[in-house]
Image (spheres, rainbow, N blue to C red):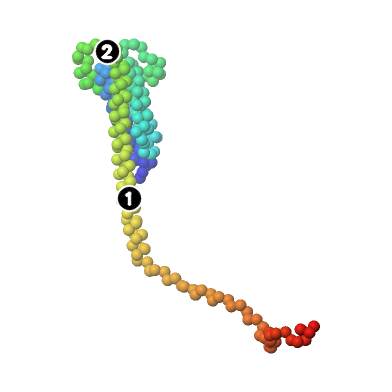
């Protein structure tokens, strides 16, 4: 079973989803001081898992992983902001939230409540540069996570190649045993055809000797 197997793709997509959503949700709660609605986190996790499963048909390089992980974190951050505004803000919900339903978005519990209470207990002024700090944290942590995932991809590729080699080894042994036990085939050596002799010419019945000095009759002429 290689990278295109359904089981391997599901495991890789699950690891990617867990890392992506955990980093995004943790950073969002840490910088905003508010918990996240659990249905929103579940919806983001399902969407990230489906995208990662569809793109996990082969081994991915660092650039491919980072190109998917960084936008996925930023998109999840935007969805988390919308969920927090719908559930914990006094402002009227936006049109997409009204279409989905506030009760559906906010029902089901919260995520990160202990961390949010710990941060909300300390009276600190909101830094105007907090959004930029959040963006920088997403980018830095996303690059580190992409490198970690790339190491996992390389290790998984080695394990799969070793498994394929170990799986084909018994077949190679069986083929070797059959080759050794087989009798050598006897080859019939055919002699080379004899060269064809040329047909003999006609036999001479008599000969005339014409060698010697010219006769006296020829000289007189």
Neighbourhood count class around disc 2 (C-alpha, 10 Å): few under 14, some 14–19, many 20 upward:
few
Quadrant the C terminus occupies: bottom right
Quickly name the residue at label 2.
127
Quickly name the residue at label 1.
165
Q: In this view, does 137 lie above or below 3?
A: above
Residue 195 is left or right of residue 151, and the answer is right
* Quarter residue 24 falls in: top left
Q: In this view, does 152 lie above or below 104?
A: below
Residue at 35% x, 66% y is 181
Question: In this view of the protein, can residue 39 be seen by the observer?
Answer: no
Q: Distance between the residues labelled 2 and 1?
A: 57 Å
Q: Where is residue 165 in the image (x, y as percent from the top left)?
A: 32, 50
Q: Identify which residue, 74 or 211, lies in the foreground.
A: 211
Neighbourhood count class around disc 1 (C-alpha, 10 Å): few under 14, some 14–19, many 20 upward:
few
Tag of residue 41: none
Q: Position of residue 11 (x, y in %)?
A: 32, 37
Q: Position of residue 126 (x, y in %)?
A: 26, 12
Q: Position of residue 219 (x, y in %)?
A: 76, 84
Quadrant the N terminus occupies: top left
Residue at 34% x, 40% y is 8
Instruction: Identify the secondary structure beneath mark 1.
Output: helix
């Amino acid at each position: 079973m290689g990278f295109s197997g359904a089981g391997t793709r599901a495991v890789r997509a699950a690891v990617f989803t867990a890392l992506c959503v955990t980093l995004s949700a943790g950073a969002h709660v840490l910088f905003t001081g508010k918990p996240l609605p659990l249905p929103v986190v579940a919806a983001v996790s399902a969407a990230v898992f489906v995208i990662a499963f569809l793109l996990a048909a082969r081994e991915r390089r660092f650039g491919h992983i980072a190109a998917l992980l960084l936008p996925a974190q930023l998109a999840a951050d935007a969805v988390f902001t919308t969920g927090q505004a719908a559930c914990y803000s006094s402002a009227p919900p936006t049109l997409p939230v009204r279409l989905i339903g506030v009760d559906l978005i906010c029902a089901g519990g919260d995520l990160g409540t202990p961390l949010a209470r710990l941060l909300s207990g300390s009276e600190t002024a909101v830094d105007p540069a907090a959004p930029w700090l959040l963006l920088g944290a997403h980018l830095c942590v996303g690059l580190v996570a992409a490198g970690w995932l790339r190491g996992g991809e390389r290790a998984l590729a080695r394990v799969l190649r070793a498994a394929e080699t170990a799986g084909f080894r018994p077949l190679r042994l069986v083929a070797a045993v059959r080759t050794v036990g087989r009798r050598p085939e006897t080859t019939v050596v055919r002699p080379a055809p004899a060269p064809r002799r040329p047909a003999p010419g006609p036999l001479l019945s008599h000969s005339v000797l014409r060698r010697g000095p010219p006769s006296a009759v020829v000289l007189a002429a």
